Image (cartoon, grey):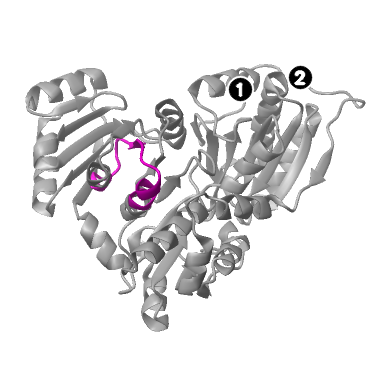
Amino acid sequence: MFDTSQLMVSVSGVRGRVGAGLTPEVIARFAAAFGAYALKRGPGRTVVVGRDSRVSGPMFIRAVTSALMSVGCDVVDVGVVPTPSVQLAVEDLHAAGGLAVTASHNPIEWNALKFIGPSGMFLDGGESAEMRAFLEGEIPRAGWDALGGVRTDDAAVERHLTRILGIPFLDVELIRSKRFHVALDCVRGAGGNMFPQLLEALGCTVDAIHLEADGRFPREPEPIAENLGELEALVRGSGAVVGLATDPDVDRLALVSEEGRAIGEDYTLALAASLVLRHRPGKVVTNLSTSRLLDDVAERAGTTLVRAPVGEINVARRMQAEGATIGGEGNGGVILPDVHLTRDAPVAAALILQLLAETGRPLGELAAEIGRYEIVKEKLPRPSQPLDAVYDELARRFPDAEADRQDGLRLSWPARKSWAHLRPSGTEPIVRIICEAPTRAEADALVAALRDALPG
């Protein structure tokens, strides 16, 4: 078995630094294992592949394609498209699975492979374990007369757009009548191939930066507030009513208000949920580390918020189980079952524009109405004793808190509108602490209390 010590291997994928652990040989091995798994599970032998705009993408997509063909898969290459477009293509083509070559929001030197099941959702724990059996064993290769074929499909984005514009409660004509002025930053990722088409279809006037899908990111690619200064300036200078920023593979959306201020990723899901719940009452699902802004939105709508372990597939599976109306993660990832069960930045953008059109109110005002909390994050060395024992001790130290052990330990104080989440990092020998409270002082105090309570 090849060395994976320099890689970050998770349930739904593998990622690493290009040339420093992540090589075409490594990618080919994972892709061949996935192909063998997909052939066993079915349906059929088709596997969809697509990528974001990263400079290393052309190299890796060729390795992926060859590996899949070598085990007998027929490859459909959808090109440089958003990851949710790849996932929808798996559904639309009734494929056995899909592979997206993308490192999402990671810096430019990274790339990755994401594993997609026939449902169009990422692999879950059980599916991943089944696939890994092929990875760790002898991968069955096809003979010359059973090799797979390859073809291209240029319609993935078009089908994705059609699905979004067909959302039952999206009033396209109402949005078009508003002629919204929108500022857009696609960070030279795959969004440059789709977002302008969506905004044109919705009648928007667009001032855009970084549409070139060449993977040479002009800023840190994660769409967090501190990376969006150029978009903030564009909103202020152009008079746009909203700024939209996405990451390279277009599954996360961040917003800039009409005042030219990045309002923070947690507001994307909170605002989208407030819109959807007007039209489609039902449960909301998010992960344990998402802001309680969403609790407040759900409470005002008279519905239930359900929390799942961190990770998109965990949220999506819980949404399936609960029959949820909307869900997602506080990093700007919105999941709308009317389209599909995966995070989707273009879906999020359409919902935000619908909210602006329906209310006739500015984005900053709508965000302020939802409320505001302060989140503080900290990393601590992982304790020497087993973490379960640490969680037990912390739960005893804070008997007034509600404890959730689905994913590490989450302690919450609903009356104080505060919570803390401790979980081990999947990539470093550390424990992550995330605390949220109505004020920064309260959040800092909560971090300090948990830090002091942790054994040395």
Between residue 150 and residue 386, name the one nearer to us. Answer: 150
- Where does the C terminus fall, quadrant-wise? top left
Where is residue 398 drawn, in percent x and y?
8, 27
- Where does the N terminus fall, quadrant-wise? top right
- What is the crowding at mark 1: few (fewer than 14 residues within 10 Å), some, or many (at least 20)? many
Residue in the picture at 64% in, 49% down: 51
Q: CA gap, disc 1 to disc 2?
A: 13 Å
Residue in the picture at 65% in, 54% down: 157
Where is residue 241 drawn, in percent x and y?
39, 73
Q: Would residue 15 be seen by someone viewing this image from the given angle?
A: yes
Mark number, residue 131: 1
**Location of residue 120 (image quadrant):** top right
Secondary structure category for the residue under label 1: helix
Where is residue 10 drawn, in percent x and y?
49, 31
Secondary structure category for the residue under label 2: loop
- What is the crowding at mark 2: few (fewer than 14 residues within 10 Å), some, or many (at least 20)? some
Queried whether the magenta region covers residue 133, the answer comes back as no
Q: Would residue 81 be seen by someone viewing this image from the given angle?
A: no
Q: In the image, is 74 to the left or to the right of 406?
A: right
Q: In the image, is 8 to the left or to the right of 374?
A: right
Residue in the picture at 64% in, 35% down: 26
Between residue 82 and residue 21, name the one nearer to us. Answer: 82
Mark number, residue 140: 2
Residue in the picture at 45% in, 34% down: 316
The amino acid type of the residue labelled 1 equals Met
The amino acid type of the residue labelled 2 equals Pro
Looking at the image, tell me whether mark 1 or mark 2 is earlier in sequence order: 1
Residue range (magenta): 273-294
Where is residue 336 drawn, in percent x and y?
47, 44
